[in-house]
Image (cartoon, rainbow, N blue to C red):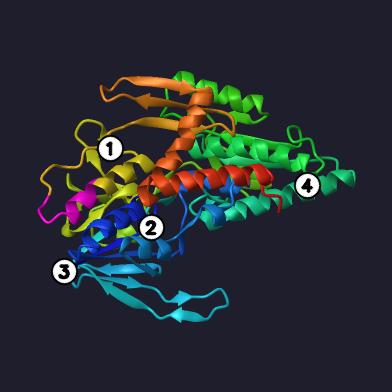
Amino acid sequence: METIVIVGGGAGGLELATRLGNSAAKTGRARVVLVDRWPTHFWKPLLHTVASGKHDPQVMAIDYAAQAAEHGFEFARGEVLGVDREARRVALAPWIADDGAEVLPARSIGYDKLVLALGSVTNFFGVPGAGQHVLTLDDVAQAETFRQRFIDGCIQASARQAAGAQEPGIDIVIVGGGATGVELAAELSHSARALARYNVHAMDPVRHVRIRILERGPLLLPHLHQRLSKRAARHLRALGIKVLLDTAVARVDAGAVIDTDGGIYPSAITLWAAGVQAPALCATLGLGTNRLRQIAVGPSLQALDDANVYAIGDCANVLCPILGKVPPRAQAAHQQALYLAQVLGQASPLDAPFAYRDYGSLVSLGPLAAVGVLTHSSGRKYAVGGALARLLYSLMYRKHQVALHGVVRMSAQTVADWIREKLSPSVRLH
């Protein structure tokens, strides 16, 4: 019985572990081990809702240990320090508790097949001061840090305003006009209004909670059609958000962002959402990588330099013969997990190469709006917006739940979420 170790429990890694657990592990064909440094899984495309306070991650998180027990795989908590590809072992750092006590010592796990599903981290592109003075949304902890800074900042600004401050309000700068930056800006605008409604702060949520998006390109959401990009920009501006296009950041200071033309944008909180790259670990494995440290893989998602190593999701450089480079999206990780579950879970090898299908892209513009493109199997694209796009956007997360839990449990969870939304404030208040 071979051992399959999956490093990373994101959208692709957890789905792959679940599928292999249900097939290969429960039938005794393989031992499946999922490794992650966190105890729970949260769907990364919704991190902006944690940062804005719309969703509580403790309610939506999935315990890896519980998922493992229900689906036949094992979970090992720990941060990966490195991989000995010759000995086929994954080295884990000691597990240290919050009080500093060592829960588990440094250890290693042997493997026959290794799947790297490490996701991505923020790419600062070498901009001076960015690594020191900005917040990011790479995980739940960072999203929670942003949320707390946002709430505390609104309360402090409100108190200064009540004391007669000459420049009342709070400035928030989001660097990057892609999906993450646009979705966060829209949700923050609604959160500022909700916090005012619940008297958490006494400021005008439009005039005094000043949100700016700095995008170096000529359009927001450059992966969408120009018409949809302009529609998204109009919607954000209608919410009171300032959208500055063709604005490249030169450096970031403690209280301001400076662009390449010398423009200065005061900022109490700066969020960097301008790009991603693979984690630094990928560059230490002795495998071929691109400039974003993504691991080069072949048609079957195997690393080009090691047939026993696979890579999926944002950390993999996957090239599709028809569509070119596969983008770092959750739908790509889902398709790769589905394919690799067949490759590793069947007794006989699968000859067909991985083929990515682009189903389109949807971007949230707050609780009531969204824009995007749906792609038909023929390749024809259809622009969607308004209530339909918002409904389709919400169904993406439900599809992820189906992959992990099945239709019945997803349906029950949907009802529970609806009841919770009706009984709770629309935003977390502290």
Q: In this orientation, does residue 329 appear? A: no
Which amino acid type is marked by label 1?
Lys
Residue pictured at 44% horizontal, 42% vertical:
398
Q: Position of residue 47 (x, y in %)?
A: 52, 47
Which amino acid type is marked by label 3?
Met
How packed mark 2 is, by other alpha carbons closer than 10 Å (few <14, some 14-19, many 20 or more), is many
Residue tagged 3: 1
Residue tagged 4: 200
Mark whose residue sits in front, 4 or 3:
3
Mark whose residue sits in front, 3 or 2:
3
Residue tagged 2: 9
How packed mark 1 is, by other alpha carbons closer than 10 Å (few <14, some 14-19, many 20 or more), is few
- Mark 3 falls on what kind of element? loop
Q: Position of residue 296 (x, y in %)?
A: 23, 49
Q: Is residue 360 magenta?
A: no
Q: Which mark is residue 339?
A: none
First in sequence: mark 4 vs mark 2: 2
In this view, the residue in front, 166 or 158, is 158
Left-right relation of 1 to 334: left
Residue tagged 1: 325
How packed mark 4 is, by other alpha carbons closer than 10 Å (few <14, some 14-19, many 20 or more), is some
Which amino acid type is marked by label 4?
Val
Q: CA distance from mark 3 to mark 1?
A: 35 Å
**Which residues are drawn in magenta?**
339-349
In this view, the residue in front, 423 or 220, is 423
Q: Tell whether label 1 touches label 4 (CB within 8 Å).
A: no
Q: Is residue 340 magenta?
A: yes
Residue pictured at 31% horizontal, 20% vertical:
380
Left-right relation of 339 to 51: left
Mark whose residue sits in front, 3 or 1:
3
Q: Tell whether label 1 touches label 3 (CB within 8 Å).
A: no
Left-right relation of 149 to 155: left
